[in-house]
Amino acid sequence: MFFALATTVWALLAARILQGLSTAIVHTIGYTLLTEAVEKEHLGKAMGYTSMALSSGLLIGPVLGGVLYDYCGYFQVFLPAFGLITIEVMLRLMVVEREKKQLNASIPPSPQLPATLQSTPRILTGGEYASSTESEPLLSHPPDPTARHTGAYKALLMSPRFGVAIASLFVLNSIANGFDSTLVPFVQDAFNMHSSRVAALFLALAIPMLLAPLSGWLADHYGPRFPILAGISVAIPSLSLLSLISQATTWPLLKMVLILAFVGLAFALAMGPFGVDAILAVHKIEEQSAPGEFGAKGILARAIGLQNTIIAGGGLLGPLYAGFVRVAVGWKGLEILNAGLCTGILVLALLCVDGRKVVERQDEEGVI
């Protein structure tokens, strides 16, 4: 509502900041509910459908908004948003949250001690005695919540698997959002294309993201490593070929549409499974931690919040990075650098991403 009624630049800026805050909160809570409600062996497919829904919104939203603005006016653009928010609130009220399992639920209770051992004297200052039971805590004060939160983030960042997953998501999101600030200027400068024809290039990049459920299905059945390696292996040559597009290229629009479609397909294959692998890494950290080390709710919500922050950082810095690099070394240098970054991701994925299926991993851990 603030955005729809804003009439100054500062009001629009404040509305966008509030919109960003609400989006960050909703994304974190939504993904947390998703990962807690879905079994591990179906996590990839569930996140794939979620990515497809987000991509569909990003694809359809600008088109619908443009039509409403042209034929109805500025304020009418926000009416579908108000309706969707109302539906979202109603659906949120219908959600039944699953109780998080306690990490120490499998630990058997200690046997009852004999009465003679349940109370032992301890000496106080001045020679007085006071009884002490085994149920009393050894520490006089509970753990500091700040230290607990710091330890949770330290555990996440010290995990090579989780670190590689979120770093890869940052790089891939930076590359994808970098096209926003470089694709249109490059095409208009090199080929003097109309903006309506340039829109086809963005559609070619976005439409393959609708295949995200396929990458989730692959992650569930073959492990995250297979679709990640497949996607990055497609991205490297695609970005390298994109660097060869120049003023001397024949049929430049057709070739760029095909190459960008392969880039979009590569990102659709890799980004979802990277998110799945990050969540599985968090579950592994919780399983290896002491009961209650990160609090009663664990660290899943904090991990997803950190992951969303990293992804948002890529969306923020990607256009700046791509714009500066294109000005400094040109379009060809930018795409070669992007291909090099994807090569680094490929190496890290080979070293850190788990290639086992979720069911196989759970069976092996059960045997152990």
Image (tube, helix red, strand yellow):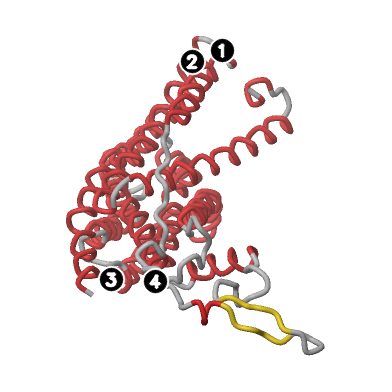
Name above or below for residue 193 compared with residue 260: above
Residue 73 badge:
1
Name above or below for residue 26 compared with residue 238: above
Dot 4 or dot 2: first in sequence order is 2
For the point 22% across and 53% down, which residue is it?
220
Q: Amino acid at mark 4?
A: Gln
Work out whether residue 42 or residue 121 is closer to the camera in this orientation and state it: 121
User: What is the C-alpha distance between the residues marked 3 and 4?
Assistant: 23 Å
Q: Nearer the viewer, mark 1 or mark 3?
A: 3
Residue 320 lies left or right of residue 361; in this view the side is: right
Q: Say few, some or many: other residues with alpha carbon within 10 Å of mark 3 (under 14 / 14 to 19 / 20 or more).
A: some
Residue 174 lies left or right of residue 229; in this view the side is: right
List the residue tagged with mark 2. Answer: 68
Q: Element under label 3?
A: helix
Q: Say few, some or many: other residues with alpha carbon within 10 Å of mark 1 (under 14 / 14 to 19 / 20 or more).
A: few
List the residue tagged with mark 3. Answer: 350
